[in-house]
Amino acid sequence: MLRKKTLEILTLREGSWAIESAARDLESAEKAALQFLGKPGVMGVRVLKETTKDIGNPSPGDILFEKLRATGSNDRIAVGEASRLAPVCEDIEDLFSGGGRKSINRLFRAYLDKNTVTATEIMHNAREMKRVMDFESLMPSAIAKVAQMQARDIEGMETSSRRDTLFGFVDRINQRAKQAEGVDLPSLSKTDINDAISEINQKANGESPGYLFRVAASRELVNVRDWWGKFALSVDWAGACKSDPALANLDWFISDALSNASVLQDLLGDQETLAGALISLIEIADGVREIDPEKAADSTTTEATAAKINSLFKAEKLPEAKLSVMDRVCRQLQGSGSLSKDKAEEPKIFREMLVRLIPGTELTGGPEMAEAITHRQSNIINKGGERGLKDATASVLPALRDPGRKAGYLLSLMDSELGKDLLKDDIDQHLNGLFMTPESVNQIIRTGVAPNKKMEKITSIFYRIQKSNLPDARKQQLTQHLDELLATYVVDGKILDRLDDPNKPLHIRAFMLVSMCQPEMLPDGKASKLAREIIVKHLRRPNFETELVAQVPDAAKKEKILRDFHVQLHRSGFFN
């Protein structure tokens, strides 16, 4: 049987043509080629007839389609933004992980995207390190920008001193990478990942095994010159890896790859709206994205890789990669792009998103998400500047309805850059209005909610305030007022009297009373103390346990009730 002719799709990167994909017909090939042209670092695309000739020098008749990107200011590699850097790095180890590497990814984003290389690869590969150090004035410019920003924000720090420190970090990273060049490490593409880890551990010889593992991984990945390929290979390694320390290092590579827009786009697939794309990204980060099992069964598909990372995210094995995805969500939400095709639908779509972003007292994405929500609301109400952000904060609250969600939003916003500066006083005023001004539980939760649900809601707010970064005096002020409201609610509503009704069997009364002392029902304070006093009074009665199960005829059931009651007493802190 004759094989069908195949058209080859080529991309031009750094002056060299390489086969990127293939297609059966010219229409499909042209469409795919134009998609490749939109990716960072691709300067041109071609569609060729399948040939055995040199693809870099084809015959004119073999070129069926060609398009080159115009060079100009849009392709200039410049230093990225440094306005939201992580805390000041004290050592080169701080640059390898977490906020330090996140900052590097932002500063060098244009360079990384154009050269199809990750920050971790550069810092662990002497050849790539030299390339970035020699590239125009990129490194000095980045260091100068960071040094100026940190010296401005940190009292007692001088720009020149900080700049020298950062240059010193670069030199040390470079020297360490050079020294690692001579170390004989196993090829991760030719050796089982777990066998390779064992071999690397044996060859450490004074160097960190984790560092050498990253060197070995970088040696493989720098030769993979497409972003999805880097991502898929890193995910494959992570899926097979049985070493938690090595998996933590692979998390860095995956996180770096997810900082590239094309990888996220490929992972997402086609999305009708920005709102849908952002919700899908959150589902990916939570490991709950629905993936077609039939497509995922084919190891060559994007769905197969998506299924693997889905499992890793669900098992919480990739914390830095999750942060990378959520960082993208925050930046896209904060931007000016429309959430829906119909601009008039924007407010409604955003309110629907808030249900997913703020499900309760905890905010998906933390302080960065709270800030992004505030900026998006500012765009929706069409008010800019400081006044716009203040008004946006106030107008988000009614949309949340639930007081626990409002507390979650405000307390997360308080930890953001906006909350620490511009919105600090506004947040304080909103907290007062929500939780200090009300004189009863019913003024905080006004809907027809059952008494136990009201108490649980106020208690969840109590705990959220308690673990917040508010000053201790402010925490005490707010939580003490909520506790007093709860105590008043319990007394005025005769809740304990209704629970301790003598007409009910004692074991039912006892369990209901103990439930009032559960940590999720009432916090340790005045309200729970009222219930505890009644329980202690019962416990001190002679033959209490006999009376507790006196109205239960079945002996086995009696034992179970006594056992369960002791468990609940222990959970409520009676034996502490």
Image: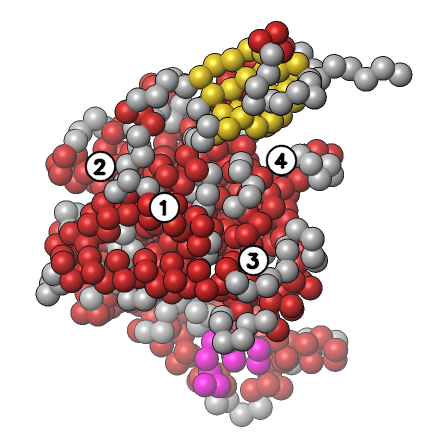
Q: Amino acid at mark 4?
A: Thr
Q: CA distance from mark 3 to mark 4?
A: 25 Å
Residue 401 % position (x, y)? 33, 42
Of marks 4 and 2, the one in the foreground: 4
Q: CA distance from mark 4 to mark 2?
A: 39 Å
Q: Residue at the far right: name it.
A: 1
* CA–CA distance in space, label 3 to label 2: 49 Å
The C terminus - image quarter:
bottom left
CB within 8 Å, label 1 to label 4: no
The residue that label 4 is drawn on is 302
Q: Is residue 464 left or right of residue 507?
A: left
Q: Nearer the viewer, residue 179 or 566?
A: 179
Q: Which residue is mark 2?
A: 392
Residue picked out by circle 1:
132
Question: What residue do we see at 66% from left, 40% from top?
Answer: 304
Can you identify the residue that label 3 sits on? 216
| Image coords of residue 283 (percent x, y) | 52, 42
In contact (CB < 8 Å): disc 1 and disc 2 = no
Question: In the structure shown, which secondary structural element does the residue marked by tag 3 occupy?
Answer: helix
Among the two numbered marks 1 and 3 on one chain, the one whose residue lies closer to the N terminus: 1
Q: Which amino acid, by three-letter code, is at mark 2? A: Ala
Q: Quadrant of the N terminus?
A: top right
Looking at the image, tell me whether mark 1 or mark 4 is earlier in sequence order.
Answer: 1
Q: Is residue 130 visible?
A: yes
The reply to whether the C-beta atoms of the residues labelled 3 and 2 are less than 8 Å apart is no
Q: Residue furthest top?
A: 61
Q: Nearer the viewer, mark 1 or mark 2?
A: 1
Q: Type of residue at label 1? A: Val
In primary-sequence order, the first of circles 3 and 4 is 3
- Seen in the picture, residue 344 relative to 85 is either above or below; the reply is above
- Where are the magenta residues, as a range? 566-576
